[in-house]
Image (spheres, helix red, strand yellow):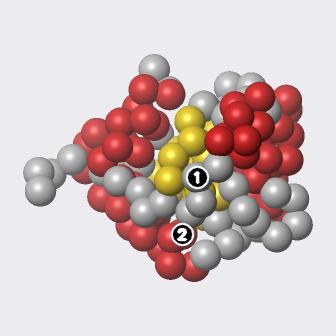
Amino acid sequence: MTDNRSDGSHKRVLVVDDEDKFRYLAKKNLAMRGFTVDVAEASEEAIAQIYKCNPSVVLLDVMMPGLTGDELVKMITDWRPEIKVIMVTAHLNQEAEEECYRNGAYAYIQKPVDFDKISEMIKEATL
């Protein structure tokens, strides 16, 4: 693997997922690629983190307790349209994908994720 630590160009990413393992892996892998990474376990925490950290991109799980990813992407893109939201799901579903795009998602990808691909998406989203 090449050293990509400088590729993130200090972009801030918020990872929102109720799975501890995914949050840990995403934070570790994206930080190695030069991104500043914050994490949230639930939608309510994500909203607080957006106020606090001002991310460029939110990596958001579709299926979460409380506010769903669909509801949260709509809220984020209505409130802060400059923030790009990349939806992540363990179960691809065309209807859910279409709903996420209607609600303002930038991208919709399936777990397990390729962090090189996500890194490129983040860079493209923040040009």
Please tell me which residue is depicted at 42% across the width and 26% down the height of the picture: 124
Residue at 75% from the left image edge and 57% from the top image edge: 46
Residue at point 35%, 54% (across, down)? 114
x%, y% of residue 83? 66, 33
Q: Earlier in the sequence, mark 1 or mark 2?
A: 2
Q: Quadrant of residue 120?
A: top left
Left or right: 118, with 51 as reference point: left
Q: Read off the residue under disc 2.
A: 23
Q: Secondary structure at mark 1?
A: loop
**Residue 73 picture location, percent across and down:** 76, 42
Residue at figure coordinates x 56%, y 63% from the top left:
90
User: Residue 80 lies in what quarter of the image?
Assistant: top right
| Spatial CA span between label 1 and label 2 | 20 Å
- Reading the image, the residue beneath label 1 is 92
Image quarter hosting the C terminus: top left
Whether residue 19 is visible to the viewer of this picture, yes or no, is yes
**Quadrant of the image for the N terminus?**
bottom left
Amino acid of disc 1: Leu
Q: Position of residue 109 (x, y in %)?
A: 51, 47
